[in-house]
Image (cartoon, rainbow, N blue to C red):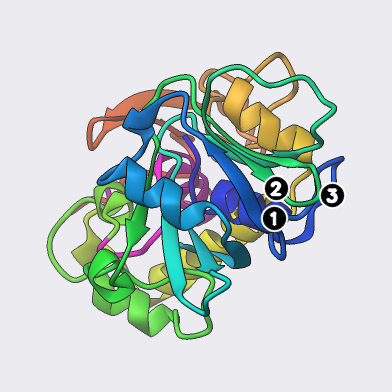
């Protein structure tokens, strides 16, 4: 499931191209194809009409949303939001390449390339956004923004809850999911069930650093690693703990254990991440 780094990487590709793909920003949409109209939340006809003839002026990310800013020839602007959910992916391919499977929305672009939204599980969706503030109301701070300091994290962690469940709450910090919660907690040597009120100031500083490190390390990952996170086909895992239950801890060699925390499969090192006595 794509989390902040995956969505950020996809946005970067849409802005800059690369890896055999062309950039989306600057392109004008010629024709929209909707093989699966259920991908659109709201009025699919209105979305198609607004996209057709519009030029993409920017692509950016908020939490796990892809935000696509559009300008029309008459000067009007619009914004489309894409959420990839479990298995969604968005990319621009050369028209000459074979059409991928599971296409839910495609758009022919003015340079002959094609914007494609694929999603085997069909949970992802696209919608028009008329009010960004309302759409993103309730989301916590972006963990890579300068404004996200250890003090801000400390304030957001107020309340008596286990730390992993707290990190998964998008109102606390935006963009973290199961993968990066586990990675961050392993880096910070914190047990996922540690109560937030038991965290020392040093723990919070350490956790803040660990969250950023896990996210940044992943954003600079290669396309192969991004593909791994979607397909998991035999390549070595790019992660420290996620999906590595039973393998040795990369820090101490103890066998990593798998458990369920906050309803999610959770991997941790029982030695490095001891649960503090209350
Ligand atoms: Zn360990």
Residue 24: which numbered mark, if any? 1
Residue at 38 percent of width and 62 percent of height? 174
In-front residue for pair 104/140: 104
Residue at 43 percent of width and 51 percent of height? 49
Residue 191 drawn at (x, y percent) = 36, 46
Q: Does the stretch in magenta take in 120? A: no
Residue 181 drawn at (x, y percent) = 42, 48
Q: Secondary structure at mark 1?
A: loop
Q: Are marks 3 and 1 in contact (CB under 8 Å)?
A: no
Residue at 61 percent of width and 63 percent of height? 56
| Relative side of 221 to 140, left or right | right
Q: Are marks 2 and 1 in contact (CB under 8 Å)?
A: yes
Residue 24 drawn at (x, y percent) = 69, 55
How many numbered tags mark residues here? 3
* Mark nearer the N terminus (2 vs 3): 3
Q: Secondary structure at mark 2?
A: strand
Where is 244 relative to 270, above or below?
above
Q: Is mark 2 within 8 Å of ligand 1?
A: no
Whether residue 64 can be seen here: no
Category of crowding for the residue at label 2, using alpha-carbon neighbours closer than 10 angstroms: few (below 14), some (14–19), many (at least 20): many
The residue pinned by badge 3 equals: 18
Residue 150 drawn at (x, y percent) = 42, 79
The residue pinned by badge 2 equals: 109
Q: CA distance from mark 3 to mark 1?
A: 11 Å
Whether residue 75 can be seen here: yes
**Which mark is nearer the camera, 2 or 3?**
2
* Mark nearer the N terminus (2 vs 1): 1
Q: Is mark 1 within 8 Å of ligand 1?
A: no
Category of crowding for the residue at label 1, using alpha-carbon neighbours closer than 10 angstroms: few (below 14), some (14–19), many (at least 20): many
Where is 16 relative to 75, above or below?
above
Which region of the structure is painted magenta?
Answer: 171-194
**Which mark is nearer the camera, 2 or 1?**
2
């Amino acid at each position: 499931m794509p989390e902040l780094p995956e969505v950020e990487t996809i946005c970067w590709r849409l802005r800059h191209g690369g890896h055999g793909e062309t950039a989306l920003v600057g392109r004008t949409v010629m024709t929209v194809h909707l093989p699966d109209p259920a991908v659109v939340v709201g009025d699919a006809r209105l979305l198609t009409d607004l996209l057709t003839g519009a030029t993409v002026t920017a692509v950016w990310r908020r939490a796990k949303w892809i935000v696509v800013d559009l300008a029309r020839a008459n000067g009007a602007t619009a914004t489309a939001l894409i959420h990839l959910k479990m298995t969604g992916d968005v990319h621009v391919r050369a028209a000459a390449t074979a059409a991928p499977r599971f296409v839910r929305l495609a758009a022919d672009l003015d340079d002959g390339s094609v914007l494609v939204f694929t999603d085997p599980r069909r949970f992802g969706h696209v919608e028009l956004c008329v009010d960004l503030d309302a759409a993103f109301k309730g989301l916590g701070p972006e963990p890579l923004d300068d404004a996200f300091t250890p003090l801000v994290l400390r304030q957001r962690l107020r309340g008596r809850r286990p730390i992993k469940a707290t990190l998964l709450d998008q109102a606390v910090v935006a963009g973290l999911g199961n993968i990066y919660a586990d990675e961050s907690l392993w880096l910070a040597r914190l047990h996922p069930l540690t109560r937030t009120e038991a965290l020392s100031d040093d723990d919070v500083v350490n956790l803040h650093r660990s969250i950023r490190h896990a996210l940044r390390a992943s954003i600079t990952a290669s396309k192969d690693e991004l593909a791994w996170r979607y397909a998991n086909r035999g390549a070595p895992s790019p992660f420290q703990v996620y999906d590595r239950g039973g393998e040795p801890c990369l820090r101490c060699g103890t066998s990593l254990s798998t458990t369920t925390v906050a309803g999610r499969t959770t991997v941790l090192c029982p030695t490095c991440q001891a649960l503090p006595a209350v």
